[in-house]
Image: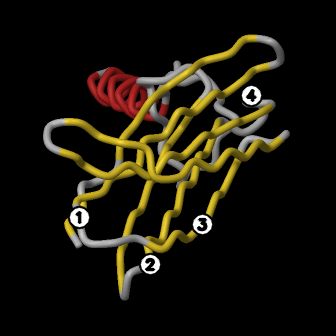
Amino acid sequence: MFKKILSLGLALILLAFCYVPSFAEELDVPVDEPVNTEYQHINTIITNLTISGGTAYVGVQVTGIINHTTKIEVTATLQKKSGTKWEKVKSWSQSSNSYMLRLNKTKAVSKGTYRIKNVVKAYKNSDCETITTYSQVITY
């Protein structure tokens, strides 16, 4: 009788370890793509500004959410510091009817301190989210 109770107890313990409920919701995002919970329609905004030999290289990549974001628009503005203010040097706008957008531009610049200001609009159909971000500050 003791062996039957022991066997039944071990079987129940094994069964308990084998049963692991899953409450995770399936996402339409690849496993290797991080999900940014700060925004509604945007996963990441990456801005890169480098200056070499009098040329500013501007790179912006906006990644929305796969099977969610339907359109992305970005206006990237190269700004130069003048005293305590940031003045516009050049702006570029680009849009994509997809969940991803890449903008790469160059601009001749003189000595000074620069940054990029991004105004990003991301859509899910007609629902629009607007986000403003800034790059690192570069002194040339």
Residue drawn at x 64%, y 38% is 64
Identify which residue, 70 or 13, lies in the foreground: 70
Say what amino acid the circle numbered 4 marks.
His
Callout 2 crowding tier (Cα within 10 Å): few <14, some 14–19, many ≥20: some
Q: Which mark is residue 112?
A: 1
Callout 4 crowding tier (Cα within 10 Å): few <14, some 14–19, many ≥20: some
Q: Nearer the viewer, mark 4 or mark 2?
A: 2
Q: Nearer the viewer, mark 4 or mark 1?
A: 1
Say what amino acid the circle numbered 1 marks.
Gly
Compared to 122, does 62 lie above or below? below
Q: Which mark is residue 68?
A: 4
Distance, label 4 to label 1, CA atoms, is 40 Å
Residue 105, quarter of picture:
bottom right
**Label 4's element?**
loop
Say if mark 4 contacts mark 1, CB within 8 Å. no
Distance, label 3 to label 1, CA atoms, is 19 Å
Q: Dividing the image into 4 quarters, which one contains the N terminus?
A: top left
Q: Which mark is residue 55?
A: 2
* Residue found farthest to the top: 127
Distance, label 2 to label 3, CA atoms, is 10 Å
Distance, label 4 to label 2, CA atoms, is 37 Å
Residue placed under numbered mark 3 in the picture = 105
Residue 106, position in %: x, y? 55, 71
Distance, label 2 to label 1, CA atoms, is 12 Å
Distance, label 3 to label 4, CA atoms, is 28 Å
Say what amino acid the circle numbered 3 marks.
Lys
Q: Earlier in the sequence, mark 2 or mark 1?
A: 2
Q: Nearer the viewer, mark 3 or mark 4?
A: 3
